[in-house]
Image (cartoon, rainbow, N blue to C red):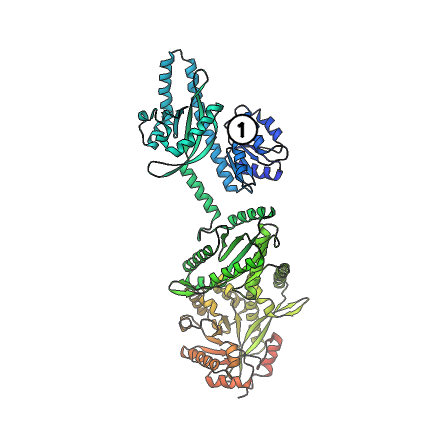
Amino acid sequence: MPLIIILDDRVTNRNIFSRLAASIAEGVEVQAFGDPAEALERLAERTPDLVITDFKMPTMTGAEFTRRFRRLPGCDDVPVIAITVYEERSFRLDALEAGATDFLLSPVDHAEFLTRARNLLQMRRQAQIIKSRASFLERELEDSERSREALLRDSRQRLAQVIDTVPALISAHDRDGACIFLNAHMSAFAAIDQAEAIGRPASELIGPERAQRSLALDQLVFRSARALPSYEEEVTDSDGAKHAFVVTKSPLSDADGRVIAVLTTALDITDRKKAESHLVHLAHHDALTGLANRTLLQDRMRREIARARRGDRFFALHLVDLDRFKSVNDALGHHRGDELLRIVADRLRNIVRETDTVARLGGDEYAVLQTDVRSAEEARDFARRLIAAIGDPFRIAGEDIVVGASLGVVLYPGDGEDTDDLIKNADIAMYRAKAEERNAMRFFSADMVTAAREGITLETDLRRAIANREFELHYQPQIDLRTGRIVGAEALVRWRHPKRGLVRPLDFLPFAEETGIIIPINEWVMREACREAKSWQAMGLPRLRVGVNLSPIQFRKLAMRDLVVDVLSESTLEPELLDLEITETILMQNAEAVAAELSELRKLGVTFSIDDFGTGYSSLAYVKKFPVDRLKIDQGFVRNMKNDPNDAAIVRAIINLGHSLGIETVAEGVDSPEQVGLLRAEGCDEAQGYLFSKPVPAAEFVALVRESATMRLSA
């Protein structure tokens, strides 16, 4: 059972490193100490397999601890990892000279910690296996009564046979650097015959540069008569391929105990290093764009925070959200959307410096960590460059696509204490930019938190309003322009807040759409509108059509046919009296699926109107493709048709388009007799607006229908 020792004067670090060490392999035993002296006392009783020590401790430095640990029996070749916050070369040299095997930079990357610890344990196990086999052979030599020469010759042969089977590069060199032995694996790697290698200098076997390093380490073994801690080395073979090895160096002694040669063992860990590197990359990068992911971004932010606390640097975090990505994704398909996301990633990469980090947090949201920021204005200039880069058109599937981006910017240390606070506040600032202007930036400020909390309060109030039935419907009459009769009404939701009174739709509907609360609200609207429309018939009113608006998110997430069937069955309203008002945005989202859904609903007998027609795509192809009964002309065109020839022409074109396809037209926002005259002249079928009535509660609407079965219209 491997034993791992954790030494750190901070209990938090001991707990973290202990949990990480325990996860390396099943059966690992972990002991943690806060006092170096106590650790040395315990280690004198039991030799560990791996030691992980903090470099800077109040009673004893990690370097001094390592020196004393190396003097303990059996601890000269135990791997030691030193952890330090210092990047200077002097600290690394101090740790290595004291006998440390490796070191990690604090704050420690968990994946790197596990990889290095696992490699050193594997190296320790391999060294013990080789040491055990060598010890076994030495004992056989001591017990044998054969002559020294015969014994040595026989032992060498058996040792060579054993060593040839070990899957490692093994060689031995004397004090002069001449090769006295190499195994079959080393012979194949160096592309030299085993017999021809004997007596040759190391430079001819492994190259001058590597030989110089290897022989210098051999001299340390000759002087100390002790094995060196294992280390990793990258080597290029005769074919030019690079390999990663874990190397150990141990003394070989003669019968008198004198060190006569150094045994070098190199275990090939190339495949494992590649696999570990790939896994580490996957754990820290976005699969679609290759950018850093949230985990890696937070790691680098923590490192920047640690550096900033030493007073030598500051940084900014830019949270980037594409403004019209969903429309592109819906119109062109997800594969084109993915292509756009990759191009955005490339543009961001081209702007940043090597010290900066670009990350994709998910969906169409990116983050850019800007390091070494000297002022808020420098961060502002950088944000403008990000917006400009994304604002340029993208060439996708032969089309120029423009999306734009909204940015939220935070500065450290002013806008947050840690990574979670900084990302949260940047997100708040980004949503403020998106809500106020789009294609713009906003720096975080404390008042944004207040606004965000108000949004949370609004969401809570809306959910309570659904449960407490605080919503009510108002109805705006729809008039047949030929007869002047009320033929239907559009159902419009209102919120009667227990404290604020009647809340304007603009104060809660956009938020409900954004948060998805619009789904249960609109379902209630449909049920209530159909129930009341059926009740009007029981009151003796004529059969009146009721229009219900559908939101894009509602149409996307619900099985509309099942809902409509359920509502009609519950209310017993005739299907042809339910008019579902949809927007052009709904039609643009997955057009094939939407067309199929509308056709299924049409079979039930319900009708469809396209709301605010003329403000979106207004494509003839879409109008022909979908089973639509009415086009509702946007009030912006109706309001100005008397004074603006262009608006009048648009209204005329929509009416002609509808009639040519057998589709009725309804003018919205009619507020003057002159507009009625113009609409009649163009052949518009129906109208609604304040000229006839504003939206009124159900009781007032019933009274309106009863008082005047025919609207008197001015010519």
Q: Give the percent coordinates (x, y) of residue 627.
A: 43, 71
Residue 185 visible in the current orientation? no
Using residue 38 as the reference point, say whether residue 171 is left or right of it: left
Q: Is residue 566 visible?
A: yes
- In this view, 374 is above or below 147: below
Taking depth in this image into account, of 553 and 432 the one nearest to the observer is: 432
Residue occupying the far right of the picture: 499
Q: How many marks?
A: 1
Classify residue 238 as left or right of residue 631.
left
Q: Residue at x 68, y 66 (%)?
A: 499
User: In which quadrant of the rendered view does residue 147 lie?
Assistant: top left
Q: Secondary structure at mark 1?
A: loop
Residue 215, given in percent of the width and then of the height, sits at 42, 29
Please determine whether, in this image, residue 622 is positioned above or below residue 113: below
Q: Which residue position is annotated with label 1?
A: 48
**Nearer-the-camera pick, 713 or 321:** 321
Of residues 699 and 323, the one nearer the viewer is 323
Residue at the bottom extreme of this rendering: 715
Quadrant in the picture for residue 492: bottom right
Residue 277 is situated, as x and y percent measured from the top left of the image, at: 44, 42
The residue lying toward the viewer, choosing from 614 and 428, is: 428
What is the three-letter code of the residue carrying label 1?
Pro
Quadrant position of residue 15: top right
Relative image position of residue 488 (x, y in whole percent): 53, 77
